[in-house]
Amino acid sequence: MKTRFRTATTVLATSLLAFAALPARAESVTLKLSHTYPDTHYLSVEGIKPFAEEVKKRTNGEVSIDIFPASQLGKGQSALIKSKLVDLAYIVPSLEAEKFPLSSVMELPTLFRSSCDGTQRLWTILQPGGVLDKQEYAPQGYRVLYIGMMAPYDVFTTSRKVVTPEDIRGLKLRGNGAAISKSLRSLGAVPVSLASSESYDAVSRGTIDGMYFPASGILPYSLETHLKHVLTGLHMGSAGAVMTISERSFKKLSPTAQKALTDIGVETQNRLCAWLDRHDAELHKRFVEEFKMEMITLTPEQSAAWTAKVQHVVTEWFNEMARVGKDGKSVVTAMGINPTH
Protein backbone atom coordinates (compact mmCIF):
# COMPACT_ATOMS: atom_id res chain seq x y z
CA MET A 1 0.00 0.00 0.00
CA LYS A 2 2.85 2.31 1.01
CA THR A 3 4.67 1.44 -2.21
CA ARG A 4 1.64 2.37 -4.28
CA PHE A 5 1.23 5.66 -2.38
CA ARG A 6 4.90 6.53 -2.85
CA THR A 7 4.67 5.72 -6.57
CA ALA A 8 1.60 7.89 -7.02
CA THR A 9 3.23 10.70 -5.05
CA THR A 10 6.37 10.45 -7.17
CA VAL A 11 4.36 10.57 -10.41
CA LEU A 12 2.39 13.60 -9.19
CA ALA A 13 5.54 15.42 -8.10
CA THR A 14 7.25 14.68 -11.42
CA SER A 15 4.20 15.96 -13.32
CA LEU A 16 4.10 19.15 -11.27
CA LEU A 17 7.80 19.75 -11.85
CA ALA A 18 7.38 19.18 -15.58
CA PHE A 19 4.45 21.59 -15.69
CA ALA A 20 6.42 24.20 -13.74
CA ALA A 21 9.29 23.86 -16.21
CA LEU A 22 7.06 24.84 -19.16
CA PRO A 23 7.62 28.43 -20.31
CA ALA A 24 4.82 30.77 -19.29
CA ARG A 25 2.68 31.80 -22.25
CA ALA A 26 2.91 35.53 -22.86
CA GLU A 27 -0.32 37.38 -22.28
CA SER A 28 -2.08 38.24 -25.53
CA VAL A 29 -2.44 41.92 -26.36
CA THR A 30 -4.40 43.90 -28.93
CA LEU A 31 -2.77 47.09 -30.21
CA LYS A 32 -4.66 49.94 -31.84
CA LEU A 33 -3.29 51.38 -35.09
CA SER A 34 -4.52 54.62 -36.69
CA HIS A 35 -3.78 56.12 -40.11
CA THR A 36 -5.12 58.80 -42.44
CA TYR A 37 -5.56 56.75 -45.62
CA PRO A 38 -8.74 55.08 -46.91
CA ASP A 39 -8.89 51.37 -46.20
CA THR A 40 -8.51 50.66 -49.95
CA HIS A 41 -5.47 52.93 -50.41
CA TYR A 42 -2.37 51.19 -51.76
CA LEU A 43 -0.34 52.12 -48.67
CA SER A 44 -2.95 50.27 -46.63
CA VAL A 45 -3.42 47.31 -48.98
CA GLU A 46 0.28 46.80 -49.72
CA GLY A 47 1.74 47.92 -46.41
CA ILE A 48 -0.39 48.42 -43.31
CA LYS A 49 -2.72 45.41 -43.62
CA PRO A 50 0.00 42.86 -44.49
CA PHE A 51 2.10 44.26 -41.65
CA ALA A 52 -0.70 43.70 -39.12
CA GLU A 53 -1.54 40.25 -40.48
CA GLU A 54 2.09 39.13 -40.35
CA VAL A 55 2.49 40.38 -36.77
CA LYS A 56 -0.43 38.24 -35.60
CA LYS A 57 0.87 35.24 -37.55
CA ARG A 58 4.51 35.57 -36.47
CA THR A 59 3.61 36.01 -32.78
CA ASN A 60 1.13 33.09 -32.86
CA GLY A 61 -1.68 35.40 -31.84
CA GLU A 62 0.19 36.97 -28.94
CA VAL A 63 -0.12 40.37 -30.64
CA SER A 64 -3.14 41.43 -32.67
CA ILE A 65 -3.57 44.82 -34.31
CA ASP A 66 -6.89 46.61 -34.74
CA ILE A 67 -6.70 49.11 -37.61
CA PHE A 68 -8.60 52.41 -37.71
CA PRO A 69 -8.23 53.93 -41.22
CA ALA A 70 -9.24 57.30 -42.68
CA SER A 71 -8.54 59.30 -39.49
CA GLN A 72 -11.51 57.67 -37.75
CA LEU A 73 -10.04 58.46 -34.33
CA GLY A 74 -8.72 61.92 -35.19
CA LYS A 75 -6.54 63.74 -37.71
CA GLY A 76 -3.37 64.33 -35.69
CA GLN A 77 -1.81 60.89 -35.73
CA SER A 78 1.11 61.64 -33.40
CA ALA A 79 -1.31 63.24 -30.92
CA LEU A 80 -3.34 60.02 -30.83
CA ILE A 81 -0.24 58.17 -29.64
CA LYS A 82 0.58 60.90 -27.10
CA SER A 83 -2.93 60.76 -25.67
CA LYS A 84 -2.72 56.95 -25.43
CA LEU A 85 -5.78 56.49 -27.64
CA VAL A 86 -3.68 54.29 -29.94
CA ASP A 87 -0.46 52.33 -29.74
CA LEU A 88 0.65 52.72 -33.35
CA ALA A 89 0.14 55.41 -35.97
CA TYR A 90 1.19 55.85 -39.58
CA ILE A 91 2.41 59.44 -39.34
CA VAL A 92 2.74 61.68 -42.40
CA PRO A 93 5.44 64.14 -41.25
CA SER A 94 4.51 66.77 -43.86
CA LEU A 95 1.08 67.03 -42.21
CA GLU A 96 2.68 67.59 -38.79
CA ALA A 97 5.67 69.66 -39.84
CA GLU A 98 5.92 71.60 -36.58
CA LYS A 99 6.53 68.35 -34.68
CA PHE A 100 8.84 66.74 -37.26
CA PRO A 101 10.76 69.56 -38.99
CA LEU A 102 13.81 67.47 -39.88
CA SER A 103 11.60 64.81 -41.46
CA SER A 104 10.88 67.26 -44.26
CA VAL A 105 14.18 65.96 -45.67
CA MET A 106 11.88 63.48 -47.46
CA GLU A 107 10.54 66.31 -49.62
CA LEU A 108 13.87 67.77 -50.71
CA PRO A 109 14.78 67.74 -54.41
CA THR A 110 17.72 65.87 -55.94
CA LEU A 111 18.29 63.42 -53.04
CA PHE A 112 16.44 60.26 -54.15
CA ARG A 113 16.11 58.35 -57.41
CA SER A 114 13.40 55.82 -56.51
CA SER A 115 11.17 54.64 -53.68
CA CYS A 116 13.68 52.01 -52.61
CA ASP A 117 16.59 54.45 -52.86
CA GLY A 118 14.77 56.87 -50.58
CA THR A 119 13.59 54.10 -48.26
CA GLN A 120 17.05 52.64 -47.70
CA ARG A 121 18.68 56.03 -47.18
CA LEU A 122 16.00 57.25 -44.79
CA TRP A 123 15.98 54.01 -42.81
CA THR A 124 19.61 54.60 -41.82
CA ILE A 125 18.52 57.75 -39.97
CA LEU A 126 15.01 56.71 -38.84
CA GLN A 127 15.77 53.34 -37.28
CA PRO A 128 16.30 53.30 -33.50
CA GLY A 129 19.62 54.98 -32.80
CA GLY A 130 19.70 56.79 -36.15
CA VAL A 131 20.34 60.53 -36.39
CA LEU A 132 16.71 61.45 -37.14
CA ASP A 133 15.38 59.04 -34.54
CA LYS A 134 17.57 60.60 -31.84
CA GLN A 135 16.58 64.14 -32.80
CA GLU A 136 12.84 63.81 -33.50
CA TYR A 137 11.20 60.49 -32.72
CA ALA A 138 12.79 59.00 -29.62
CA PRO A 139 12.58 62.28 -27.62
CA GLN A 140 8.82 62.34 -28.23
CA GLY A 141 8.37 58.72 -27.16
CA TYR A 142 8.01 57.18 -30.63
CA ARG A 143 9.79 54.19 -32.14
CA VAL A 144 9.87 53.91 -35.93
CA LEU A 145 9.04 50.45 -37.32
CA TYR A 146 9.09 51.23 -41.04
CA ILE A 147 8.81 53.97 -43.65
CA GLY A 148 6.63 54.10 -46.74
CA MET A 149 8.50 56.36 -49.16
CA MET A 150 6.93 57.43 -52.41
CA ALA A 151 8.83 57.30 -55.69
CA PRO A 152 9.84 60.72 -57.06
CA TYR A 153 6.74 62.61 -58.13
CA ASP A 154 5.75 63.42 -61.71
CA VAL A 155 4.20 66.58 -63.17
CA PHE A 156 0.67 65.93 -64.46
CA THR A 157 -1.11 68.68 -66.42
CA THR A 158 -4.57 69.12 -67.90
CA SER A 159 -3.74 71.13 -71.02
CA ARG A 160 -0.24 72.57 -71.21
CA LYS A 161 2.54 70.17 -72.16
CA VAL A 162 5.58 70.57 -69.89
CA VAL A 163 9.08 69.64 -71.09
CA THR A 164 11.42 72.42 -69.97
CA PRO A 165 11.49 74.41 -66.71
CA GLU A 166 10.15 77.39 -68.63
CA ASP A 167 6.99 75.44 -69.57
CA ILE A 168 5.89 75.15 -65.96
CA ARG A 169 5.84 78.89 -65.30
CA GLY A 170 2.48 80.22 -64.16
CA LEU A 171 0.83 76.82 -63.76
CA LYS A 172 -1.19 76.23 -60.61
CA LEU A 173 -0.15 72.78 -59.40
CA ARG A 174 -1.20 70.77 -56.41
CA GLY A 175 1.99 70.56 -54.37
CA ASN A 176 1.95 69.80 -50.64
CA GLY A 177 4.86 70.18 -48.27
CA ALA A 178 7.08 73.19 -47.57
CA ALA A 179 10.10 71.97 -49.55
CA ILE A 180 8.01 70.83 -52.52
CA SER A 181 6.22 74.18 -52.57
CA LYS A 182 9.57 75.98 -52.62
CA SER A 183 10.79 73.86 -55.52
CA LEU A 184 7.66 74.67 -57.53
CA ARG A 185 7.90 78.38 -56.74
CA SER A 186 11.54 78.46 -57.79
CA LEU A 187 10.42 77.17 -61.19
CA GLY A 188 7.77 79.86 -61.49
CA ALA A 189 4.80 77.58 -60.78
CA VAL A 190 2.11 78.33 -58.21
CA PRO A 191 1.87 75.56 -55.58
CA VAL A 192 -1.61 74.87 -54.20
CA SER A 193 -1.93 72.86 -51.00
CA LEU A 194 -4.77 70.36 -51.21
CA ALA A 195 -5.74 67.12 -49.54
CA SER A 196 -5.57 64.27 -52.02
CA SER A 197 -9.32 63.76 -51.62
CA GLU A 198 -9.92 67.35 -52.81
CA SER A 199 -7.79 66.99 -55.94
CA TYR A 200 -10.49 65.61 -58.23
CA ASP A 201 -12.78 68.60 -57.74
CA ALA A 202 -9.89 71.03 -58.15
CA VAL A 203 -8.74 69.43 -61.42
CA SER A 204 -12.19 68.90 -62.90
CA ARG A 205 -13.27 72.49 -62.17
CA GLY A 206 -10.05 74.01 -63.45
CA THR A 207 -9.10 75.41 -60.06
CA ILE A 208 -5.65 73.96 -60.65
CA ASP A 209 -3.80 73.19 -63.88
CA GLY A 210 -2.36 69.92 -62.71
CA MET A 211 -0.55 68.02 -60.00
CA TYR A 212 2.94 67.43 -58.70
CA PHE A 213 1.96 63.98 -57.51
CA PRO A 214 2.99 60.30 -57.34
CA ALA A 215 1.92 58.19 -60.30
CA SER A 216 0.48 55.69 -57.83
CA GLY A 217 -1.90 58.34 -56.51
CA ILE A 218 -3.67 59.14 -59.79
CA LEU A 219 -6.07 56.20 -60.17
CA PRO A 220 -7.21 55.99 -56.51
CA TYR A 221 -8.57 59.53 -56.83
CA SER A 222 -9.99 59.08 -60.38
CA LEU A 223 -7.79 61.83 -61.83
CA GLU A 224 -6.83 59.98 -65.01
CA THR A 225 -9.74 61.31 -67.09
CA HIS A 226 -8.77 64.96 -66.61
CA LEU A 227 -4.98 64.81 -66.88
CA LYS A 228 -3.54 64.78 -70.39
CA HIS A 229 0.24 65.13 -70.04
CA VAL A 230 2.81 63.48 -67.76
CA LEU A 231 6.39 64.63 -67.24
CA THR A 232 8.55 61.97 -65.60
CA GLY A 233 12.26 61.60 -64.88
CA LEU A 234 12.32 64.49 -62.40
CA HIS A 235 14.07 64.17 -59.06
CA MET A 236 12.40 67.00 -57.21
CA GLY A 237 11.35 65.14 -54.09
CA SER A 238 8.29 63.28 -52.88
CA ALA A 239 6.90 62.36 -49.47
CA GLY A 240 6.65 59.51 -47.04
CA ALA A 241 4.75 58.13 -44.06
CA VAL A 242 6.30 56.61 -40.97
CA MET A 243 4.88 53.67 -39.03
CA THR A 244 5.51 54.42 -35.38
CA ILE A 245 4.71 52.72 -32.11
CA SER A 246 4.64 54.28 -28.69
CA GLU A 247 7.83 53.34 -26.87
CA ARG A 248 5.64 52.76 -23.84
CA SER A 249 3.52 50.20 -25.70
CA PHE A 250 6.59 48.60 -27.29
CA LYS A 251 8.27 48.00 -23.92
CA LYS A 252 5.18 46.22 -22.60
CA LEU A 253 5.53 43.53 -25.27
CA SER A 254 7.50 40.35 -24.75
CA PRO A 255 11.03 40.25 -26.24
CA THR A 256 9.76 37.79 -28.85
CA ALA A 257 6.96 40.12 -29.89
CA GLN A 258 9.31 43.12 -29.95
CA LYS A 259 11.64 41.29 -32.31
CA ALA A 260 8.71 40.24 -34.51
CA LEU A 261 7.44 43.82 -34.90
CA THR A 262 10.96 45.08 -35.62
CA ASP A 263 11.73 42.39 -38.21
CA ILE A 264 8.32 42.61 -39.91
CA GLY A 265 8.63 46.38 -40.14
CA VAL A 266 11.86 46.16 -42.13
CA GLU A 267 10.44 43.39 -44.32
CA THR A 268 7.32 45.49 -44.97
CA GLN A 269 9.21 48.59 -46.08
CA ASN A 270 11.49 46.61 -48.39
CA ARG A 271 8.55 44.85 -50.03
CA LEU A 272 6.50 48.06 -50.20
CA CYS A 273 9.20 50.15 -51.87
CA ALA A 274 9.81 47.44 -54.47
CA TRP A 275 6.06 47.34 -55.17
CA LEU A 276 5.88 51.14 -55.48
CA ASP A 277 8.77 51.33 -57.93
CA ARG A 278 7.36 48.48 -60.01
CA HIS A 279 3.83 49.89 -59.83
CA ASP A 280 4.98 53.33 -61.00
CA ALA A 281 6.56 51.79 -64.09
CA GLU A 282 3.39 49.81 -64.82
CA LEU A 283 1.24 52.91 -64.35
CA HIS A 284 3.31 54.98 -66.76
CA LYS A 285 2.58 52.37 -69.39
CA ARG A 286 -1.14 52.38 -68.57
CA PHE A 287 -1.31 56.17 -68.69
CA VAL A 288 -0.21 56.06 -72.31
CA GLU A 289 -1.91 52.93 -73.59
CA GLU A 290 -5.16 52.96 -71.64
CA PHE A 291 -5.79 56.62 -70.80
CA LYS A 292 -4.10 58.17 -73.84
CA MET A 293 -1.96 60.59 -71.86
CA GLU A 294 1.14 62.03 -73.49
CA MET A 295 4.23 60.84 -71.62
CA ILE A 296 7.38 62.95 -71.65
CA THR A 297 10.41 61.21 -70.15
CA LEU A 298 13.36 63.44 -69.42
CA THR A 299 16.85 62.45 -70.50
CA PRO A 300 19.59 62.70 -67.83
CA GLU A 301 20.72 65.96 -69.42
CA GLN A 302 17.20 67.43 -69.35
CA SER A 303 16.72 66.28 -65.76
CA ALA A 304 19.96 68.03 -64.81
CA ALA A 305 18.55 71.31 -66.16
CA TRP A 306 15.57 70.98 -63.83
CA THR A 307 17.79 69.97 -60.91
CA ALA A 308 19.95 73.06 -61.35
CA LYS A 309 16.87 75.23 -60.89
CA VAL A 310 15.93 73.71 -57.54
CA GLN A 311 19.26 72.76 -55.98
CA HIS A 312 19.22 75.93 -53.86
CA VAL A 313 16.17 74.59 -52.01
CA VAL A 314 18.44 72.08 -50.22
CA THR A 315 20.81 74.83 -49.07
CA GLU A 316 17.90 76.96 -47.90
CA TRP A 317 16.57 73.99 -45.95
CA PHE A 318 19.91 73.65 -44.13
CA ASN A 319 19.69 77.31 -43.14
CA GLU A 320 16.08 77.01 -42.01
CA MET A 321 16.87 74.02 -39.84
CA ALA A 322 19.86 75.84 -38.32
CA ARG A 323 17.63 78.76 -37.37
CA VAL A 324 15.45 76.44 -35.27
CA GLY A 325 18.45 74.69 -33.76
CA LYS A 326 18.41 71.62 -36.02
CA ASP A 327 21.38 70.20 -37.91
CA GLY A 328 20.02 69.39 -41.35
CA LYS A 329 23.46 68.77 -42.85
CA SER A 330 24.15 65.92 -40.42
CA VAL A 331 20.85 64.29 -41.44
CA VAL A 332 21.68 64.41 -45.15
CA THR A 333 25.27 63.28 -44.56
CA ALA A 334 24.08 60.31 -42.47
CA MET A 335 22.09 59.14 -45.50
CA GLY A 336 25.31 58.84 -47.48
CA ILE A 337 24.66 61.99 -49.52
CA ASN A 338 27.17 64.79 -49.99
CA PRO A 339 25.28 67.88 -48.73
CA THR A 340 27.15 70.08 -51.23
CA HIS A 341 26.36 67.92 -54.27
Image (cartoon, helix red, strand yellow):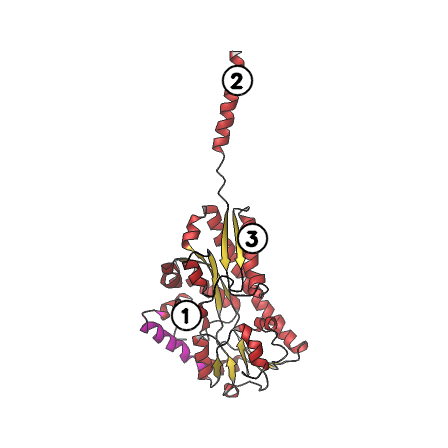
Badge 1 or badge 3: first in the primary sequence:
3
Magenta stretch encompasses residue 320: yes
Image-quadrant location for residue 134: bottom left
Quarter of the picture holding the C terminus: bottom left
Which one is nearer the viewer's eye here, 124 or 239?
A: 239
Which numbered disc covers residue 341? none
Residue 284 in the image, given as x and y percentages of width and height: 61, 74
Residue 20 in the image, given as x and y percentages of width and height: 47, 31
Q: Magenta stretch: give its range.
A: 308-327
Tell me, yes or no, whether the two marked residues, 1 and 2, touch with CB atoms within 8 Å: no
- Reading the image, the residue beneath label 3 is 54
Which numbered disc covers residue 7? 2
Q: Dot 2: few (<14), some (14–19), or many (≥20) neighbours within 10 Å?
A: few
Tell me, yes or no, whether the two marked residues, 3 and 2, touch with CB atoms within 8 Å: no
- Reading the image, the residue beneath label 1 is 97
Disc 1 versus disc 2: distance between alpha carbons?
72 Å
Q: Of circles 1 and 3, which is in front?
A: 1
Looking at numbered disc 2 in the image, what kind of residue is underneath it? Answer: Thr
Disc 3 versus disc 2: distance between alpha carbons?
48 Å
Work out whether 57 lies above or below 229: above
Q: Of circles 1 and 2, which is in front?
A: 1
Which residue does the image show at 43% across and 48% down from the upper left? 252
Residue 143 in the image, given as x and y percentages of width and height: 42, 57
Q: Residue furthest right?
A: 290
Which residue does the image show at 43% across and 75% down from the upper left? 178
Mark yes or no: residue 52 visible. yes
Image-quadrant location for residue 102: bottom left
* Secondary element type, mark 3: helix
Which one is nearer the viewer's eye here, 207 or 130?
A: 207
Which one is nearer the viewer's eye here, 29 or 3?
A: 29
SS majority, magenta:
helix
Disc 1 versus disc 3: distance between alpha carbons?
31 Å
